Image (cartoon, rainbow, N blue to C red):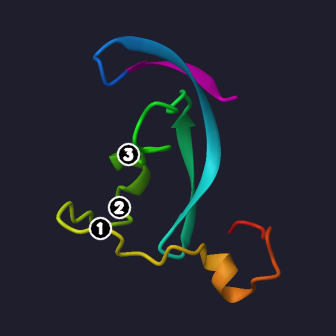
Amino acid sequence: LLDKREVKNSGGHSQLRPVIQTIVELGGKQWPIELTLTSRDAMGFRMLLGREAVRRRFLVDAGNSYLQNPQPHHALNDPATDHEEFS
């Protein structure tokens, strides 16, 4: 647990959420990001990746979907390896 932060939810109400750091992998690239945690059980997407997480790494085209390969990069290189050190 890195911190606890006030975040406005989709209804505009402030919530105090726990913050963690983890590694995200997208398009064959890996980097550390900070995430705030909340229950998304009743929502359409399990996770939202914000603009800060992809800033200076990707250009987002809101008119297209599913432009990246659905398999993680390390699974494509070696299917027998489930855990790999992050670089």
Q: Is residue 4 magenta?
A: yes
- Residue that carries the numbered disc 3 in the rendered image: 50
**Left-right relation of 84 to 35:** right
The residue segment tinted magenta is 1-8
Residue 54 in the image: above or below residue 16: below
Q: Quadrant of the C terminus?
A: bottom right
Q: Quadrant of the N terminus?
A: top right
Amino acid carrying mark 1 in the image: Ser
Whether the residues at callouts 3 and 1 have beta carbons within 8 Å, the answer is: no
- Residue that carries the numbered disc 1 in the rendered image: 65
Amino acid carrying mark 2 in the image: Arg
Q: Is residue 83 magenta?
A: no
Residue 38 in the image: above or below residue 25: above
Instruction: Report the Cα–Cα distance between label 2 and label 1.
Output: 20 Å
Amino acid carrying mark 3 in the image: Gly
Residue 43 in the image: above or below residue 82: above
